[in-house]
Amino acid sequence: KIAEAAVSRGLAGTVWPGRFEILSEKPLIVLDGAHNPAGVKMLVETWRAFLAARYGWSAHETDSRARLVFGSVADKDISEMAQLLRPLAREVSLVRLANERGAEPALLAPSFAGLPCACYESVSAVWRDLAAAHPETVTLVTGSLFLVGEMLARRQGNAEECQLNERLEKLTATR
């Protein structure tokens, strides 16, 4: 029995780190923790609408524009996520997660066949490339909440924090 206006105000004021979060304006870097096909499908729709609103690009112009940074845990439907994301990308940076369940970057590459792919052994390595990107570069970082968490930790200069999820996951599994 919550008033509709109160629900609207609450949603309007909600901040959800890692959900379509703008990490940088120039170059544009957007983080989104989409980690399954349903989440990625919504992300693709949001990405296209965002670029259309921000730059006035048509639906066709939003495709093949992004540098996609992708990392995932191995037990996800990576192939379907990649199929949904592939049209957005002009190139793909595949990154190893600090999580032991992380998929091997080289094994992710076939899911992005036809696109230039670079493999990174850590978020730190891809972070250096993102920081050096041309100011007009448009980058979408997605595939895992672990990846987004690591990126946010790097932004805050807290590299140790990115290991937190790994430790918590092991602790939870033993209980």
Image (cartoon, rainbow, N blue to C red):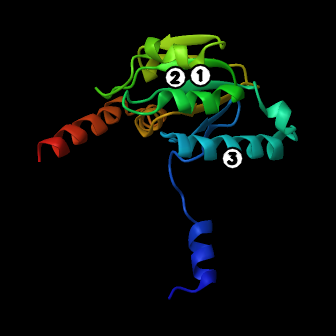
Task: Give percent across and percent down for residue 66.
Answer: 70, 26
Q: Give the label on residue 46, or none.
A: 3
Residue labelled with disc 2: 127
Looking at numbered disc 1 in the image, what kind of residue is underneath it? Answer: Leu
Frontmost residue, 36 versus 151: 36
Q: Is residue 168 left or right of residue 145?
A: left
Q: Is residue 20 left or right of residue 63?
A: left
Frontmost residue, 83 versus 136: 83
Looking at numbered disc 3 in the image, what kind of residue is underneath it? Answer: Thr
User: Considering only vertical position in the picture, is 139 above or below 111?
Assistant: below
User: Which of pointers 3 and 2 lies earlier in the amino acid sequence?
Assistant: 3
Residue drawn at point x = 41 percent, y = 19 percent: 122
Spatial distance from mark 1 to mark 3, Cα to Cα? 22 Å
Spatial distance from mark 3 to mark 2, Cα to Cα? 24 Å
Looking at numbered disc 2 in the image, what kind of residue is underneath it? Answer: Trp
Task: Give percent across and percent down for residue 118.
Answer: 55, 11
Residue labelled with disc 1: 130
